[in-house]
Image (cartoon, rainbow, N blue to C red):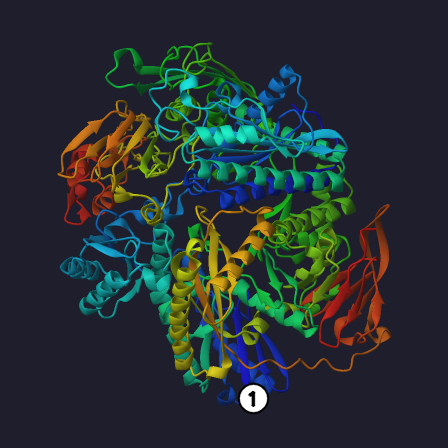
Amino acid sequence: MPETPRIDPVSASVIQGALQSIAIEMGYKLMRMSYSSIIRESEDFGAALTDATGRQIAESMQSTPLQSGPIAGYVENVLKVLAERGETIAPGDVIMHNDPYGGASHGPDIAFLVPVFWEGELAGFSATTAHHLDVGAQTPGSAGIVDAIDVYAEGLQFKAIKVVEGGRRNAAVWQILRDNVRAPKLVVGDMEAQIAACEIGAERFRALLAEHGPARVTAAIDALMDHSETLMRRAIAAVPDGVYRATTMLDGFEGDPERSDLTLAVTLTVAGDSIDVDLTGTSPQVSDRPINMPFTGTTDIAIWLTLRSILLDSAVHGVIPQNSGLTRPVTIRAPKGCLANPSFPAPVIARFTGGNQLADTVMKALAQAVPGQVSAGIGNLKVIAFSGLQGESHWVHMEIFEGSYGGREGMDGMDAVDTLYANTRNNPIEDIETHLPLRVTRYELREGVAGAGRWRGGFGSVRAFEFLENGGGSVEGEGHRYAPWGFLGGAEGGTSRLGIAAADGGFTDLPSKVSYRAAKAGESFVAFGPAGGGYGNPFERDPAAVLDDVLDGLISEETARESYGVAISGRSVDAEATAALRA
Amino acid sequence: MRLIGVDVGGTFTDLVCVETESGALTIHKVPTTPHDPSEAVLNGILELCELAGVARESVDRVLHGTTTATNAILEHDGALTGLITNEGYRDILHIGRHQRPQHYSIRQEVPWQDRPLVKRRHRKVVAGRMAPPEGRVLVPLDEAGVRAAARELREEGVEAIAICFLFSYLDPAHEQRAREIVLEEYPEVFVTTSAEVSPQFREFERFTTTAMNAFIGPKVRRYVSRLEERLAENGLTADLHIMGSNGGVATARMVCELPVMTLLSGPAAGIIGGAWAGALSGRDSLITFDVGGTSADIGIVRDGAFAEASARDTSIAGFPLMVPMIDIHTIGAGGGSIAHLDAGGAFRVGPRSAGAVPGPAAYRRGGTKPTVTDANVVLGRLDAGNFLGGAMSLDVDAAGRVIDGLAAELGLSRLETAEGILTLVNANMANLVRSRTVQKGLDPRSFALVAFGGGGPLQAVDVAAMLDIPEVIVPPAPGITSAMGLVATDMKYDLVRTAFLSSLDAEGAAARATATLDAMQAELAARLAADGFAEADTAFERSGDVRYVGQGYELRVAIPAGPLDAAAMEALFEVFTGLHRAEYGRINPGNPIEIVNLRVSAAGRMPVLGRPAVGQGGSLKAALLGHRPCTFRMATGLETLETPVYLRGSLPLGERIAGPAIIVQKDTTSILRPQDSMVADPGGNLLIQVGGKD
């Protein structure tokens, strides 16, 4: 257990509240200043404060977990790289970093770090990350680069580069950047917004140091991390000791025997108040396709955030400060060279949905220990980068396609939401069609597909994007071949599906990963989202709930009868016939 | 003119009667009747007329703040509601922005899925589709389909129908036609369209707001018409006006059509009342600080005017709400907030509250948890024998016991613990004030803090000191500031239109903005004329939601009256640039700017209230009730000082009084630390000068 904090409890709480509001302000302002919809609407960005060694102190409440969580890893790596190069950090520096093997875990998530100095000493960092529209990879956009053979093919790499040094902008770096990304205005505008948010955070951090003095602030930060650690240890201690194993499967590259049907294996060992996570048994890395998940930034985050979401569920435990203290009770091991710990320069840019599948596998293992705290298998996500040329300029739009949750004890799964370590937002149809040569021709629940269960899985969505001009799309997704797992007698959920609809109505199925595919005006990408797994025996589902689903047009009377043993007659349950079916 | 303001709160219904010419003011308070709030409203008004000695038929206007709509949403107790929307988009209300409300939770609820405003079976789709930029019709409206949907919904027994089509903010024709058809098939249904509720882009937010309007519509309509009837039956022929979230009142008829505009009206009346109080002493830069039992509301008044919330920051019960609303921020911190150690051993206050029952331990209603009120009792800040003007006696021992329990866990003394509770709750409030000032580029030092609600004046000086705010204002009757706000405000209507006007074509933008704004203003002028306002009593304010092209969030920029030209547009964009710098610390030179929405706000001026009669004031000696030990944080640590207790009503006017001091009046207690001093202002307020940090 952590030591007793060296600060009185009142001051600790006051300083911690102030730190949290700084991080919130940073996120709020970044979102409002930024240009591309992947940041301002989808909220695929992060903001956090760290101490001088990179330990995360507080993070923005907006933003997606997969962006704020890794910031500690970015800072640690930047410090290491600068030390190796013999560079020092000075006031007025702004550092850019996106090294996939140095905390970023894929190139599009570019961080900006502003150091916070107090009386000549480095006191911490104010940092933001954001998913940028384009980083100069082989095809437009920064998603669906599924053909890259190594990290060099994935776009520009910035390893602890001072884009502003002692207050002076490094004009050459900015020019190289502008010349090598598509949509440079948006990308650079977003970067400026990131830096501005960092500067606001740094200014507030300095004001806090001035008000309370560095010693008290440091003590409050230590107490804050110890506090989070204590909460996590207590939660782990409540889990029965034991070894819990699970595996799930990834599509990988459908139709490519050497690169498809990959295994994610998790062995959780719960002992007292700590957890060891061993990924031995996970498939070897795919050395020439970018679905590998760097250990720092994807694998660790997927595991930490999933454990935290289950064991310190904020709906049950209230808001708990997210900081580096939460991760102390957890050790993670992954054999070097496996999918979850690849070796440089194996490509990684499309690691997003694989990482979410790893999160799901962790939940599947933990489900055996705490069945009341999990959901059955989640439906995984998909990202499509839509792009085209208008004159000599690119337009790029990235859209994240939602999954769904499995059933939960006492609750059905959430329908059509982002899952586990991601929590982005969709773009309003009225915004997309106003600004882009795209039309969203359908967006509603996908009827008839859900994991049956006493508490059924959530429904996925159907969403279709039509090209109004010639363009193209690149796709990275998962879950076409393997359905979300059912739990405690619940049925498996539904796989997802993707295709191109031609203007004349013809439909061509696509795999879950598509390197750039040109699309003519009038063609549409149509995504059928996955449905979460069922929880518990469907024959124990409340017949009234089954009736509700029928009345709502979500399942047919036939499904009610066959999957749930419920007979519907007119607009009500036929109790006698139901009893007979369920007997 | 004779006005009555009635504000229905959770526990009490507050009433004021004012004569605008003389400033004569009569106050009354009756218990709220939750089963039918109109009962307390009616009886309270009748009693108030009696108290004030005025004939019922001589009352000109009744201005009413009601929580009927709010409670219907919070309790999810509204009408069975149907939706008619575009084919292919049945579940916009259900999928939302596909984001979970909480990042780190498996077992969370999704409000729009777990508590739908419209069940899927009642969401009907019809063919018809418009497209941007002008609302071109891609697919004509299937009128037969609308008719069939209306019939189905009627058979299914829905009481209210929301009509929500994509891009209706560009052209409401399809929605309007659908509305006509629905009314032909089902004349008695409550029907509402998304373009009439909030013609702005972002379909999930607009559709949700519209569905909410339908969901609460029948209930609000019933409430308002019953109240009107009962008032009339009892000889009150006054016009009934109802407070809106936008800080103005509207006619009963308007509120029956757009009940969604009243959803956040409670705190809105408070900020108006705070602004009214500030004006009594000539102060127009104010932070209003309204502290009740469970929450604190904070609002900002600049140059006498309140700010409007950004349309994307407003929500209720987890649902987004896209209607004009005063910028007010609420935190769960009040007198009943419970102090505790969380599971990780950290010291926290709130957001859980002991509420009115069991309430703080000191209330003798069975409370066993230490609250902010108990801390105030232990520190000597609340008078146990004279709470609420003697209406209630506090249990000092019980307060001490529950604080001691926490003190033992913390390893602190009783007084350190009690003072720590106040410090934490005040720090939470100060953080909230910072988020509305410092984070917006405003300097709190240039504001006065207006403290009201039962708990505001108890905490105000400490909060002000944390923020270097130099002055605290305690209004004449802090407990009924919201009811005062009702009689102090104007009739107010807002219109908004999505426009997309770019700085790249300043001339074209100027022409379109002028035409659109003139048309909006004409519509509002007609509405005010119909309400009986002479042209001289109306005022219009124009503004735009402006951003750099490519951004997704806007800043509100005032637009001058009259025709605009290119130069006026340039000036407007210049103002935007300044606001951007203040808010974000930087600007983006060379980046084109666009106006996304045009707004017009119309006010029908109500008679200006005279100053309340304050009387001649007394003497310090006459006001002194005695002394009481009261504990303060001094440079050297906590010190308990024999502190004079003064009766507010007997204080001398205009005389500076040194702290420490406790000022009691029927509905609140104000605290001055040793560093502070105060003057009872002839305007009716207490003006407290906040001393330095030492």
Q: Along the line of sight, which residue is nearer the eye, B339 or A341?
A: A341
- The residue that disc 1 covers is B54
Residue A116 in the figure: left or right of residue A31: right
Q: In the rendered view, tell whether residue A582 sits above or below residue A554.
A: above
Q: Residue B237: in sight, yes or no?
A: yes
Q: In the rendered view, tell whether residue B599 sits above or below residue A181.
A: below
Residue B433 image offset from top left, x and y in percent = 63, 53
Residue B331 image offset from top left, x and y in percent = 58, 52
Examine the image and state in which quarter residue B637 appears: top right
Residue A87 in the figure: left or right of residue B548: right
Q: In the rendered view, tell whether residue A567 sits above or below residue A148.
A: below
Crowd rating for badge 1 (residues with CA inside 10 Å; few <14, some 14–19, many 20+): some
Asked which secondary structure carries label 1, the reply is: loop
Q: Amino acid at mark 1?
A: Val
Examine the image and state in which quarter residue A218 appears: top right
Q: In the rendered view, tell whether residue B226 sits above or below residue B54.
A: above
Q: Residue at x 26, y 33 (%)?
A: A452
Q: Residue A233: in sight, yes or no?
A: no
Examine the image and state in which quarter residue A464 appears: top left
Residue A337 in the figure: left or right of residue B480: left
Q: Along the line of sight, which residue is nearer the eye, B358 or B595?
A: B595
Residue A577 image offset from top left, x and y in percent = 15, 40
The number of discs equals 1
Residue B600 image offset from top left, x and y in percent = 45, 67
Q: Chain of mark 1?
A: B
Q: Along the line of sight, which residue is nearer the eye, B684 or B519?
A: B519
Quarter of the image where the N terminus of chain B is located? bottom right
